[in-house]
Image (cartoon, rainbow, N blue to C red):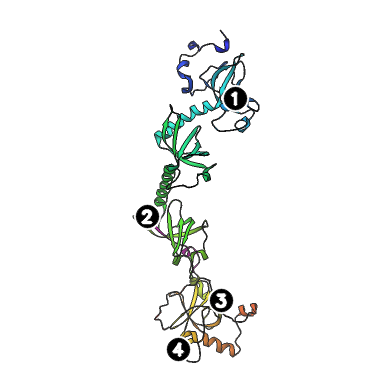
């Protein structure tokens, strides 16, 4: 009998015939010789254009043909293995007149993959897989062997272009296995939904009101921005973005921008989180008296007109009221008789109330002081720009607690 084709000798190991029963065998053996049906470890000793030689400790090296290296479509063996690399191989048998030992890395990988996939299916655990092909009706993913992701299980809702997933590493859950038919059905949709739920549960279990959290701007609307907190979206209302007025969220934020926000309110029953951005920024009213003094002149811009006067912005987030009686030494019936939105002007600070976030200003007093030789605010001197209306002032401002019926 050809010594390379001798039958298994149970006397060498009482459980050898059972342990290494064809592709069911996962045991590693270290013997002087190897036998069909075993999975053994070997070292790559030679790589050619269409095959690989592997030293598995037998009397001769074994050969792996290109189609036995992997279930993937490859052109050269060196795309899969490297010289000197240790790999696990399945002993197929012998071929040729000389009885060359024939090996398969693909079959060894598949045996291990089946075992892992069965365990994943039983536990419901999510694994990662690389999308290697786009086929009719879905995607092919590498899970140690070819797994199929039906189009209906790629994502929630219809996906028009599956090509965008090619080459991506995606989370998947095993939903069907059939060894006999070599069928592996996977679901990315279920995996993504479960991961999202886990992240959502994690966020809700750790987030608390008044806590500062990190998030990413997910979308912008006219009334605010939705911030992704890692599985849960919170609403950052436009009124909570700045200490000043914001015309539109896009003036301050961009989709994909990372920001820190404060949790203002939590509503677990409705799955809603209210966030604030201005709360993590310095409040200009906290130090208002350090920058402005009563009786002094300052540079400002008219940002809003009301029947009772004009609001002048002194800096972003700080505006003061010039009452209609303080707009001109002459009697006027409406603010537009003297000033327009966008005009730059010099005003005198009459009174500061940090608690109420109010500053009372006077335009007529400022004009009188300048006419009597009072020095212009330094910002005018440095810029040497004449006073002129602005086309449209976009800087944010805060109207404080002024009411339309205030007469102060």
Secondary element under disc 1, as helix, strand or loop, is: strand
**Residue holding disc 2:** 271
The residues colored magenta run 270-283
Instruction: Name the quarter where the N terminus is drawn.
Output: top right
Secondary element under disc 2, as helix, strand or loop, is: loop
At 48% from the left and 86% from the top, the residue drawn is 326
Q: CA distance from mark 3 to mark 4?
A: 25 Å
**Residue holding disc 4:** 333
Q: Determine the image quadrant of residue 389.
A: bottom right
Q: Nearer the viewer, mark 3 or mark 2?
A: 3
Position of residue 169 measured from the top left corner of the image (x, y, whole percent): 52, 41
Q: Are marks 4 and 1 in contact (CB under 8 Å)?
A: no
Q: CA distance from mark 4 to mark 1?
A: 96 Å
Q: Nearer the viewer, mark 4 or mark 1?
A: 1
Q: CA distance from mark 3 to mark 2?
A: 43 Å
Q: Nearer the viewer, mark 2 or mark 4?
A: 4
Whichever of callouts 4 and 1 sits on the residue coming sooner in the sequence is: 1
Residue reaching furthest to the front: 136
**Residue holding disc 1:** 65
């Amino acid at each position: 009998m050809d010594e390379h084709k001798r039958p298994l000798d149970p006397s060498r190991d009482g459980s050898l015939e059972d342990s290494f029963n064809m592709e069911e065998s996962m045991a590693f053996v270290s013997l002087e010789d190897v036998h069909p049906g075993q999975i053994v470890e070997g070292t790559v000793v030679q790589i050619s254009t269409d095959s690989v030689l592997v030293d598995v400790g037998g009397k001769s090296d074994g050969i792996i043909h290109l189609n036995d290296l992997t279930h993937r479509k490859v052109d050269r063996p060196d795309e899969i293995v490297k010289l000197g690399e240790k790999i696990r191989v399945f002993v197929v048998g012998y071929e040729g007149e000389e009885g060359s030992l024939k090996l398969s890395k693909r079959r060894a990988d598949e045996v291990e993959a089946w075992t892992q996939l069965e365990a994943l299916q039983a536990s419901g655990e999510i694994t990662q897989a690389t999308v290697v092909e786009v086929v009719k009706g879905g995607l092919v993913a590498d899970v140690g062997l070819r797994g199929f992701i039906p189009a209906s299980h790629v994502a929630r809702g219809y996906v028009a272009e599956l090509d965008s997933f090619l080459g991506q590493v995606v989370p998947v859950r095993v939903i069907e296995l059939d060894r006999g038919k070599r069928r592996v059905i996977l679901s990315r949709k279920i995996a993504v939904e479960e991961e999202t739920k886990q992240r959502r549960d994690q966020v809700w279990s750790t987030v608390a009101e008044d806590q500062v959290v990190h998030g990413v701007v997910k979308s912008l609307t006219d009334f605010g921005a939705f911030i992704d907190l890692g599985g849960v979206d919170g609403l950052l209302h436009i009124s909570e973005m700045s200490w000043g007025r914001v015309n539109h969220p896009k003036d301050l934020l961009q989709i994909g921008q990372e920001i820190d926000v404060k949790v203002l309110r939590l509503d677990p029953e409705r799955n809603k989180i209210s966030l604030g951005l201005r709360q993590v920024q310095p409040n200009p009213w906290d130090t208002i008296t350090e920058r402005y003094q009563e009786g002094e002149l300052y540079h400002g811009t008219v940002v809003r007109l009301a029947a009772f006067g004009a609001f002048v912005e002194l800096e972003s987030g700080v505006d003061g009221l010039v009452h209609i009686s303080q707009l001109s030494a002459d009697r006027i019936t409406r603010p537009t008789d003297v000033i327009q939105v966008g005009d730059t002007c010099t005003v005198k600070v009459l009174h500061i109330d940090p608690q109420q976030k109010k500053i009372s200003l006077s335009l007529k007093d400022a004009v009188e002081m300048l006419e009597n030789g009072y020095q212009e605010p330094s910002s005018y001197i440095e810029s040497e720009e004449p006073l002129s209306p602005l086309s449209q002032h976009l800087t944010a401002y805060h109207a404080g607690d002024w009411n339309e019926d205030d007469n102060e």
